[in-house]
Image (cartoon, rainbow, N blue to C red):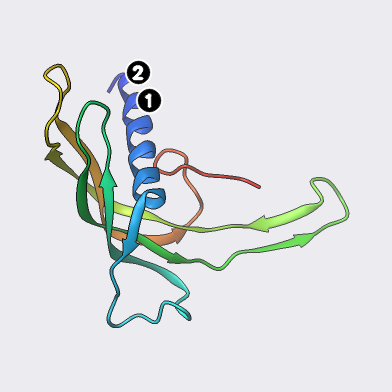
Amino acid sequence: MSSHRLNLHRLIWGSLILQLLVVYEHALPASNISLQTFIGCAVREFRFMARKPGCKKLRITADACWGRCETWERPILEPPYIEAYHRVCTYNESKSMTVKMPDCLPDVDPYYTYPVALRCDCDLCSTTTTECVTL
């Protein structure tokens, strides 16, 4: 795969994962998981609004990663003055799904592709698949 195509692929996946995590409207309840006490990472069903310029919005239900992962930091006396271990709930295995957006303008590609989680794990944040925000 060419580096331009690989970078475009990474950009699209990062954008789509961010949309799944940030733009979702609400999570459907999981019957066997206590959301208040659960520590770990799991696949959960989410509903989100797919948006594409030139098309009407489309409500999508898809599996995505959800959870809380244990992290820690401790101060140290030498640079960089902190030792940190931050893991995030992230996609370990996923597949792509494509839907046709409704009522698109004639010159707009009506297809919208998004990731669907097959397996999620607590892991270090990877910028190849996730928008990693550092504080």
Q: Which residue is pictured at 43% across the width and 66% down the height?
A: 67
Residue drawn at (56%, 68%) of the image: 70
Left or right of 46 in this view: 104: left
Query: Which label belongs to residue 70?
Result: none
For disc 1, the marked residue is: 7
- Label 1: which secondary element: helix
| Position above or below: 36 against 129 | below
Q: CA distance from mark 1 to mark 2?
A: 5 Å
Residue 1 screen position, x and y as percent: 27, 23
Image coordinates of residue 23 in percent, x first then y, are: 37, 48
Q: Residue at x 28, y 69 (%)?
A: 28
Q: From what the image shows, is residue 27 above or below residue 77?
A: below
Disc number at residue 4? 2
Q: Amino acid at mark 1?
A: Asn
Residue at 12% x, 32% y is: 103
* Residue 74 quadrant: bottom right
Instruction: Choose between 50 and 67: the one closer to the eye.
Output: 50
Neighbour class for label 2 at 10 Å: few (<14), some, many (≥20)? few
**Can you give x and y, in whole percent of width and height, for residue 98 in the image?**
15, 40
Quarter where residue 10 is shown: top left
Q: 10 Å neighbourhood of mark 1: few (<14), some, or many (≥20)?
A: few
* Total numbered labels: 2
Tag 1 and tag 2, C-beta contact below 8 Å: yes
Front residue of this view, candidates 127 and 27 = 27
Question: Hey, what amino acid is under mark 2?
Answer: His
Whether residue 44 sits left or right of residue 135 in the image: it is: left
Locate residue 14: give its quadrant: top left
